[in-house]
Image (cartoon, rainbow, N blue to C red):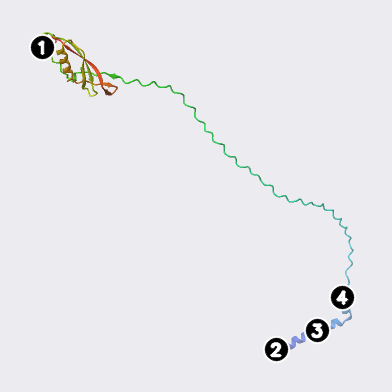
């Protein structure tokens, strides 16, 4: 019931609004005002004065560009690396000439000896016949001594004049020992003279 009443009221309100509008539109003053508004809206807008713009200047002739032929890139010449200069070795100056040393002196040669005390060589035997007869004198012997100090050869170099004394001297020296001759530190073979004296006063 309430809903039907609300619907009726709303419908009546809409009808009243529509009716009022219709009444206003039917009045002559309202129509005239509406026509004026419509005329104003339809009237064309005032003409716009044409403004003549200055004609643009003719374009300047563009210079003709000559196309330069594209040159091939020039080959870049690279200098070959310089070969290293050969190393120059400076030879040292030759040494100053050295004075030639004098040749070494030849080694000293020492003669053989028979009179060394440590040899303990016995005296020659004085023959009894020579004593009784009074024979005396000096016998000179020549002896070849080995590097070991032994007599190798005993010769009578000078006789005393008595054969018995010469033979007695030779027989005694053949049993002697000698200090060998030396050349520097080396023992060598050599000859040596050995005097043997027979004296009755000294015996």
Query: Element under label 3?
Result: helix
Question: In which quadrant will I find the N terminus?
Answer: bottom right
Query: In the rendering, at what x and y percent does residue 187 appear?
Result: 26, 23
Query: Tag 2, which secondary structure?
Result: helix
Instruction: State which mark lies toward you, 1 or 4.
Output: 1
**Does 32 sit left or right of 137 as displayed?**
right
Residue tagged by mark 3? 18
In the rendered view, would you say 149 is above or below 31?
A: above
The residue that mark 1 highlights is 129
Q: Residues within 10 Å of mark 3 (few under 14, many from 20)?
A: few
Q: Earlier in the sequence, mark 1 or mark 4?
A: 4
Q: Are marks 3 and 2 in contact (CB under 8 Å)?
A: no
Determine the secondary structure under disc 4.
helix
Across the whole image, how many numbered discs are drawn on residues? 4
- Left or right of 110? Residue 48 is right
* Position in image of residue 85 (x %, y %): 57, 37
Q: Which residue is mark 2?
A: 3
Q: Residue at x 74, y 87 (%)?
A: 9
Which quarter of the figure has residue 27?
A: bottom right
Q: Nearer the viewer, mark 1 or mark 3?
A: 1
The percent coordinates of residue 148 (x first, y second) are 23, 24
Left or right: residue 189 versus residue 61 is left
Sequence order check: which comes first, mark 3 or mark 4?
A: 3
Observer-side mark, 2 or 1, equals 1
Residue 38's disc is 4
């Amino acid at each position: 019931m309430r809903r039907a009443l609300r619907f009726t009221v709303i419908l009546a309100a809409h009808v009243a609004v529509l009716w009022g509008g219709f009444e206003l539109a039917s009045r002559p003053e309202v129509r005239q005002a509406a026509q004026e508004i419509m005329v104003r809206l339809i009237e064309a807008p005032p003409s716009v004065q044409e403004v003549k713009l200055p004609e643009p200047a003719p374009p300047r002739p563009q210079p003709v560009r000559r196309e330069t032929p594209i040159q091939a890139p020039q080959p870049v010449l690279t200098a070959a690396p310089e070969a290293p200069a050969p190393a120059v070795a400076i030879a040292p100056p030759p040494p100053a000439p050295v004075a030639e040393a004098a040749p070494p002196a030849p080694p000293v040669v020492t003669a053989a000896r028979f009179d060394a005390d440590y040899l303990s060589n016995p005296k020659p035997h004085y023959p009894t016949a020579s004593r009784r007869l009074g024979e005396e004198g000096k016998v000179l012997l020549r002896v070849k001594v080995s590097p070991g100090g032994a007599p190798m050869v005993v010769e009578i170099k000078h006789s005393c004049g008595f054969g018995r004394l010469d033979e007695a001297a030779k027989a005694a020296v053949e049993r002697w020992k000698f200090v060998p001759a030396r050349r520097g530190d080396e023992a060598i073979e050599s000859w040596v003279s050995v005097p043997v004296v027979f004296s009755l006063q000294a015996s």
